[in-house]
């Protein structure tokens, strides 16, 4: 199941992701974080964690090093 | 299938956009074509605060460029370490990196919603005047059904390339080249879209270009950072150059930029500013 999530992230990376410059204030980037989170927690919890990370990656936060 | 997945959460947004479109036509009395332009402009105006925020952090980032270059040089072989060190540097200096994912991702549903709204509009065109500027006879017809459509397509492709060109100062060469070729590939697909959609795409691209031009004026370019001279808040030239001389460790093109150019809204180049 988790590979569905990972596949979707790769799908994003090679479609919309190509349209924008690499832009994330965290390390690893949000998409990499999502892939790692899916691997570690599975589809449901992984996507929750990735979603929360995406919400944190906003102009009012400072970013930094943050592994799932 | 994809449409169903995309559309179900976007339906309220699509309805909202349709309402705005109808309002522009019925209440403000704009022709349909101009309503599309108006709707696009409204969406982009709503996104402006995000851009402003990004310009501010870009200016802030630019003032720390020499130290960041130093870090990048130090950990050249190890991308992960390099990233981690950069993040630490941001944190220590309380820099807020310009880029963030959320604004980018938040734009997707809006643009996809707009796309579907205009597609529905063009499939079931309302009665009334559907021409634009006496050039485009029918914005609901396919773009490649009339010569004016090709004109729109050309403007679309050029504006898309221009916006890449302006945005692309931070990306690497391969990505940039790819992005410059992309609109030409898209053209084949976009040619079958209704002219109204191309009109929207063109408008939003032109807006991006305008924004890019303004951003460019506000943020100094990469190789062109001797900003101390442009800002009234920085110390006089001698002091700035003294500061630069004291830091021999920094790589030489960046060494000139030690004084923090907080806001760089001045004229571009003054005589003798660069050596």
Image (cartoon, coloured by chain):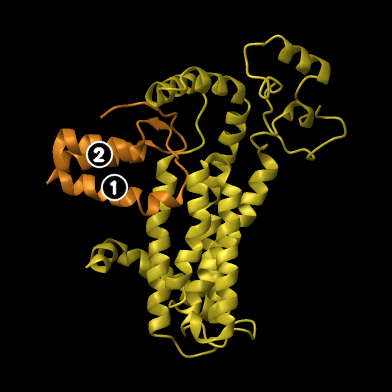
Letter of the yellow chain: B
Residue placed under numbered mark 2 in the picture: A35
Q: Chain of mark 1?
A: A
Give chain A's shade.
Answer: orange
Q: Relative to the observer, which residue lies in front, B49 or B3? A: B3
Q: In this rendering, is residue B61 above or below B219?
A: above
Q: Are marks 1 and 2 in contact (CB under 8 Å)?
A: yes
Vertically, is B122 above or below B230?
below
Callout 1: helix, strand or loop? Answer: helix
Q: Which residue is mark 1?
A: A10
Dividing the picture into quadrants, the one containing residue B231 is: top right
> Distance of mark 1 from mark 2, alpha carbons?
9 Å
Observer-nearest of B33 and B257? B257
Q: For residue B210, which quarter of the picture? A: bottom right
Q: Residue A66, percent across and down?
A: 33, 26
What x and y, as percent, mark residue A27? 37, 29
Side of B49 relative to B268 (left or right): left
Tell me: residue B242, above or below residue A30. Answer: above
Q: Residues within 10 Å of mark 2 (few under 14, many from 20)?
A: many
């Amino acid at each position: 199941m988790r590979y569905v999530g990972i596949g979707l992230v790769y799908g994003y990376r090679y479609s919309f992701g190509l349209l924008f410059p690499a832009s994330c204030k965290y390390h690893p980037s949000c998409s990499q974080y999502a892939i790692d989170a899916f691997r570690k927690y599975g589809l449901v919890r992984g996507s929750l964690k990735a979603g929360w990370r995406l919400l944190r990656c906003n102009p009012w936060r400072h970013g930094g090093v943050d592994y799932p | 299938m994809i449409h169903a997945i995309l559309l179900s959460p976007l339906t309220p947004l699509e309805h909202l956009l349709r309402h705005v479109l109808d309002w522009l036509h019925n209440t403000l009395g704009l022709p349909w074509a101009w309503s599309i332009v108006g709707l696009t402009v409204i969406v982009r105006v709503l996104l402006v605060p995000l851009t402003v925020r990004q310009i501010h952090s870009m200016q802030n980032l630019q003032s720390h460029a020499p130290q960041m270059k130093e870090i990048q040089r130090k950990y050249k072989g190890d991308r992960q370490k390099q990233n981690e060190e950069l993040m630490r540097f941001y944190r220590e200096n309380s820099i807020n990196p310009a880029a963030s994912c959320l604004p980018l991702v938040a734009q997707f549903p809006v643009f996809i919603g707009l796309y579907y709204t205009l597609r529905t509009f063009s499939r079931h065109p309302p009665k009334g005047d559907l021409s634009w500027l006496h050039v485009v006879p029918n914005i609901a017809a396919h773009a490649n059904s009339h010569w004016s459509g090709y004109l729109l397509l050309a403007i679309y492709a050029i504006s898309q390339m221009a916006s890449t060109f302006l945005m692309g100062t931070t990306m690497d060469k391969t990505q940039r080249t790819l992005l410059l070729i992309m609109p030409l590939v898209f053209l084949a697909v976009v040619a079958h879209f209704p002219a109204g959609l191309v009109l929207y795409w063109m408008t939003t691209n032109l807006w991006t270009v305008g924004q890019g031009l303004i951003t460019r004026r506000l943020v100094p370019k990469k190789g062109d950072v001797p900003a101390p001279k442009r800002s009234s808040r920085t110390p006089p030239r001698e002091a700035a150059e003294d500061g630069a001389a004291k830091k021999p460790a920094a790589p030489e093109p960046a060494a000139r930029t030690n004084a923090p150019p907080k806001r760089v809204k001045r004229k571009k180049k003054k005589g003798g500013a660069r050596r």
